[in-house]
Image (cartoon, grey):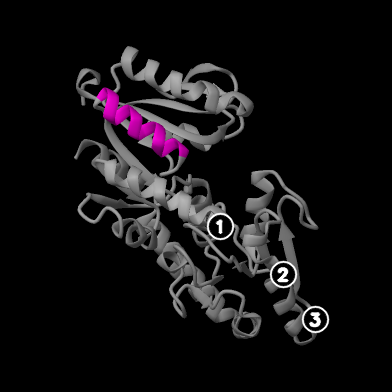
């Protein structure tokens, strides 16, 4: 496509960008640049940088909501933006709605998680704003089917697109040295919604029957700490299985990464997780907070390595067919250009 005919798209979100460390961004924006001209307004430093065919405008966190609205209007006017994509239906969504109403820009609202879970005490107020943003959208993109069902209660007639957050899985899929060592892996931050105590309690119930196994908790605030991405991948490619005991989730990237490395996943049946984990096929699902059920599923899997390997193969096949980099780029460009 000629660059003159490409839509100019402004992405607005509160994600913090590190353009030197997050090299997966290269694959994402170079891919999107095949069909659109991307501009990004987000948190971080430096203020402006051109990279991978994209103009990044990054604002430090304390100043973000002071400067972001002015920057968004300026970019829309000076760069002749065609389409605004907002990362969520709350503050970013309200800014996107203002750009649509005042400047008549096309608006795409993304849903990466349940807005009501951010601040449960303010659920009614959050829903009040979110449903107005959703109703103003020209298109809505969700990372999982449960979010589509939620949004359709307020904006039933909109065009919906469902595909996951970008995860550069090529390096994971290219890994050939995969082993099944005797440890169950958790990767994430130490946060209430991650359900870590349920996993620890379930492991306590079974560990006497599996003395050679251990539980590995990796992430910020956890016993093994936050590790570099390459070390996390090494831990993942050698684990026996991945456990995701979350109370609430969107579509966890860590599950896609584990599946790309041919690992079975035991996860709570919540949010977008059932879109990835098919109970009894590529892993197991259990009811949120049900420690006994989690322990039972762990016991079944740890007793049968042949089953674990077969489930891992099925998970890898799912990732290869539906969640490759190329599939993401194709889905995104189809959405914008439709």
The quadrant of the rendering that contains the C terminus is: top left
What residue did someone put label 3 on? Answer: 211
Magenta stretch in the rendered image: 91-103
Mark found first going from the N terminus, 1 or 2:
1
> Which structural element holds mark 3?
loop
321 in the magenta segment = no
Pick whichever, 337 or 265, lies toward us.
337
Q: Position of residue 140 (x, y in %)?
A: 30, 47
Locate residue 276: give its quadrant.
bottom left
Q: Residue at x 75, y 75 (%)?
A: 213
Q: Are marks 3 and 2 in contact (CB under 8 Å)?
A: no
**Helix, strand or loop for disc 2:** helix
Residue 12 coordinates in the image, percent (x, y): 43, 32
Q: Nearer the viewer, residue 181 or 99?
A: 99
Q: Secondary structure at mark 1?
A: helix
Question: Which is nearer the N-term, disc 3 or disc 1?
Answer: 1
Judged by its main secondary structure, the magenta piece is: helix
Q: Is residue 164 left or right of residue 302?
A: left
As drawn, 74 above or below 266: above
Circle 3 or circle 1, nearest the eye: 1
Distance of label 3 from label 1 (alpha carbons) = 40 Å
Picture disc at residue 258? none
The mark found on residue 197 in the picture is 2
Numbered label attached to residue 120: 1
Left or right of 147: which side holds 262? right
State the count of labels.
3
Measured in 3D between alpha carbons, the distance from the residue under mark 3 to the one under mark 2, in whole angstroms, is 20 Å
């Amino acid at each position: 496509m000629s660059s003159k005919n490409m839509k100019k798209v402004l992405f607005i979100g509160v994600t913090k960008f590190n353009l030197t460390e997050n090299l997966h961004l290269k694959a994402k924006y170079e891919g999107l640049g095949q069909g659109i001209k991307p501009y990004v307004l987000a948190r971080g430093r430096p203020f402006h940088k051109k990279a991978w065919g994209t103009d990044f405008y990054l604002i430090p966190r304390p100043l973000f909501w002071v400067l972001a609205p002015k920057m968004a209007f300026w970019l829309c006017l000076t760069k002749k933006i065609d389409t605004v994509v907002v990362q969520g239906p709350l503050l970013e969504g309200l800014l996107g709605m203002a750009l649509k109403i005042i400047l008549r820009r096309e608006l795409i609202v993304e849903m990466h998680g349940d807005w009501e879970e951010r601040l449960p005490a303010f659920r009614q107020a959050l829903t009040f704003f979110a449903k107005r943003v959703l109703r103003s959208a020209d298109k809505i993109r969700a990372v999982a089917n449960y979010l589509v069902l939620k949004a359709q209660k307020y904006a039933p007639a909109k065009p919906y697109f469902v595909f996951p957050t970008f995860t550069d899985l090529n390096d994971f899929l290219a890994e050939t040295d995969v082993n099944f060592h005797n440890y169950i892996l958790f990767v994430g931050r130490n946060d209430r919604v991650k359900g870590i105590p349920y996993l620890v309690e379930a492991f306590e119930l079974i560990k006497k029957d599996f003395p050679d196994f251990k539980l590995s908790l990796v992430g910020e605030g956890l016993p093994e700490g936050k590790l570099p991405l390459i070390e996390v991948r090494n831990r993942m490619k050698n684990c026996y299985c991945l456990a995701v005991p979350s109370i609430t989730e969107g579509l966890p990237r860590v599950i896609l990464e584990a599946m790309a490395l041919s690992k079975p996943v035991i996860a709570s049946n919540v949010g977008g997780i059932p879109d990835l984990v098919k109970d009894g096929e590529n892993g197991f699902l259990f009811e949120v907070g049900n420690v006994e059920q989690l322990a039972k599923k762990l016991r079944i899997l740890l007793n049968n390595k042949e089953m674990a390997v077969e489930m891992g193969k099925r998970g890898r096949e799912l990732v290869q067919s539906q969640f490759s980099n190329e599939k993401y780029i194709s889905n995104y460009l189809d959405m914008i250009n439709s």
